[in-house]
Amino acid sequence: MLQFIKNWTLPLAMLAGVIGYFCFATFDFLTPTRPVVKILIAWLTPFLIFAQLLLTFCKVEVKELVPQCWQGWLLLVQFLSCLLVACLLLFLPLDEYWRAALQGAMVCLICPTATAAAVITGKLGGSAAALTTYTLLSNLLAAIMVPLVFPLVEPTDIAFGESFLRILGKVFPLLLFPFFTAVLLRRFFPSVHRFLVGLKDMAFYLWALALIIVMGQTTRSVVEGNISVGEELLIAFWALVVCVLQFWLGKYIGGRHDNRISGGQALGQKNTVLAIWMAYTYLNPASAIAPGSYVVWQNIINSWQLWKKRRNG
């Protein structure tokens, strides 16, 4: 049973999130707990993002973070694709739901690599060290691009400068503070650092816990949203297109530099917990359906890759 759960952690986590939502929505005796659960999730989500990044960065030394050519190309893909979609949102006369679909696609493009990607890359036989380097670089890119682009594509009553500083103040520390914490722990608290490094696959299981929350939020958005099923399918479809393209492009670019597995995971596997949080917080809330459905698409691909790897020995 334990081996079955270990092999199918990702699909089971997605199923648990869906079941969890319907339990809270259906059973009246759980109604008093809903406000508490809502507050808990609001605090737990950034904590899980921080914890996953911290565990990932603890496993690599600064001197090992050597950027490679293929990583530069992937960063360029992220940058240009996000910029392209932002330009479409700025200059084309789009209705609300096409804007939500494109905003969702934009979030999925600029969102940094998932913190558990290094674990899955190692399981698939790729370079976990190279993937960790890219994870840090993609987080840095997102920390710069999100405050610059999001206030432009979703205008508010707040001045651009104030909006930029507000988003920067929330996103930048959340993405980079774990890295500096890992460096300080390695230097001044080696025993704590060794303990964290010894937590094998913990980042993967924290990601699975975050996946349960994400799937619950996604299911809630779909069921309780005030948009039609057709519009939800449109947003989810564009997320599927973006997901497949990013995995394919990552594998293609990485393959040309002998890092096919690492390249595919680096560009294709996204920190969807962070993406949904950014979409809910700074964009049209309906756009959160895109990273929510991206959870399903990327984990179907990852589950298939892990199954194929186990089958081939």
Image (cartoon, grey):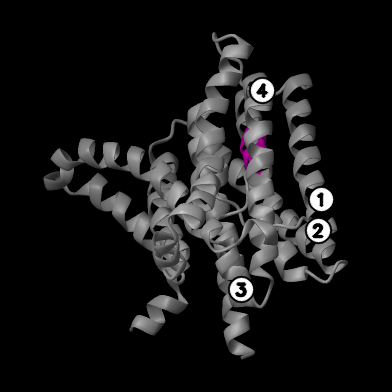
Secondary structure category for the residue under label 4: helix
Q: Is residue 50 magenta?
A: no
User: In the rendered structure, which amino acid carries the disc numbered 1?
Assistant: Gly
Is 148 drawn above or below residue 32 in the view shown?
above
Q: Quadrant of residue 262?
A: bottom right
The residue positioned 50% from the left and 39% from the top of the image is 174
Q: Depth check: 137 or 103 in front?
A: 137
Q: Residue furthest right?
A: 256
Q: Could you tell which of marks 1 and 4 lies nearer the N-terminus?
A: 1
Q: Depth check: 11 or 182 in front?
A: 182
CB within 8 Å, label 4 to label 2: no
Which SS does the magenta portion mostly show?
helix
With 208 as the anchor, is 69 left or right in this view? right
The residue singled out by tag 1 in the image is 72
Between circles 1 and 4, the one closer to the viewer is: 1
The residue singled out by tag 2 in the image is 68
The residue positioned 56% from the left and 34% from the top of the image is 172
Secondary structure category for the residue under label 3: helix
Question: Any mark on residue 122, and which?
Answer: 3
Q: Could you tell which of marks 4 and 2 lies nearer the N-terminus?
A: 2
Task: Work out whether residue 268 can be spotted.
Answer: no
The residue singled out by tag 4 in the image is 153
User: In the rendered structure, which amino acid carries the disc numbered 4?
Assistant: Val
Task: Work out whether residue 92 can be spotted.
Answer: yes
